[in-house]
Amino acid sequence: MIKLKDLLKEELIAKVRGFEVFKNPKTISRMDANLRAISNPDGDLFVIESNDVIHSDLAKAVSAKGYKIPTYLSSEELVELTERGYIYWVRKGNSGDFYLGESYTFGYPFDDPEFKPAVKKYARKTKSKNPQYNFIAKSIYD
């Protein structure tokens, strides 16, 4: 059960098509299964309550509020952003587990041995600010 005091602590930072975006939410239990999230190099997690919004729309909404979250157009750009600490996540079902988003599915360069250490480094940083969640350094589709 969600406690009122926990809801009041949630930091609502934006809306996308009427859906709320939170920074480092204490709980995601009332949010959709398979929702999307993005973490930044500081370990902040930006979560949108609906699974009907894609990562690029989430990134644009968060950036418009002063948190610079770059978007990408190619696999190479996604790898470069990830190695700088911007990671695109998908919640697995209704769990507290976040996996790399759908765009991380397509082989090289994501299978490059240097890629996963960068993901793990920033996942640990995000976990330190959001200990209630797990961040798994593999694609949601693996």
Image (cartoon, rainbow, N blue to C red):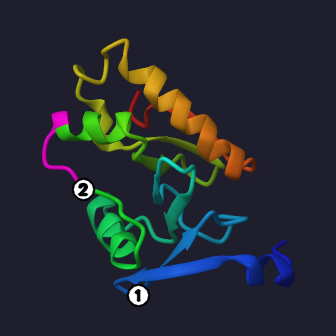
Q: Does residue 97 lie above or below 139 as drawn?
A: below
Side of 24 relative to 117 (left or right): right
Q: Is 12 within the magenta? A: no
Q: Give the residue furthest to the top.
A: 113
Any part of residue 53 in sight:
no
Q: Which is nearer the eye, 41 or 77?
A: 41
* Magenta-drawn stretch, dominant element (helix, strand or loop): loop
- Image location (x, y in percent) of residue 77: 19, 40
Q: Residues within 10 Å of mark 1 (few under 14, many from 20)?
A: few
Q: Which residues are magenta?
A: 71-76
Where residue 41 appears, x then y in whole percent? Answer: 48, 47
Residue drawn where x is 56% and y is 56% of the image = 44
Q: Nearer the viewer, mark 2 or mark 1?
A: 2
Q: From the viewer's perspective, is 101 left or right of 37? A: left
* Residue that badge 1 annotates: 18
Q: Position of residue 45 (x, y in %)?
A: 55, 57
Dot 2 or dot 1: first in sequence order is 1
In the rendered image, residue 139, in percent from the top left (x then y), is placed at 40, 33
Helix, strand or loop at disc 2? loop
Identify the residue at the far left of this view: 73
* Residue identified by numbered label 2: 71
Split into 4 quadrants, where in the image is the C terminus? Answer: top left
Eyeballing the image, is 56 above or below 140? below
Q: CA distance from mark 2 to mark 1?
A: 21 Å
Q: Which mark is residue 121?
A: none
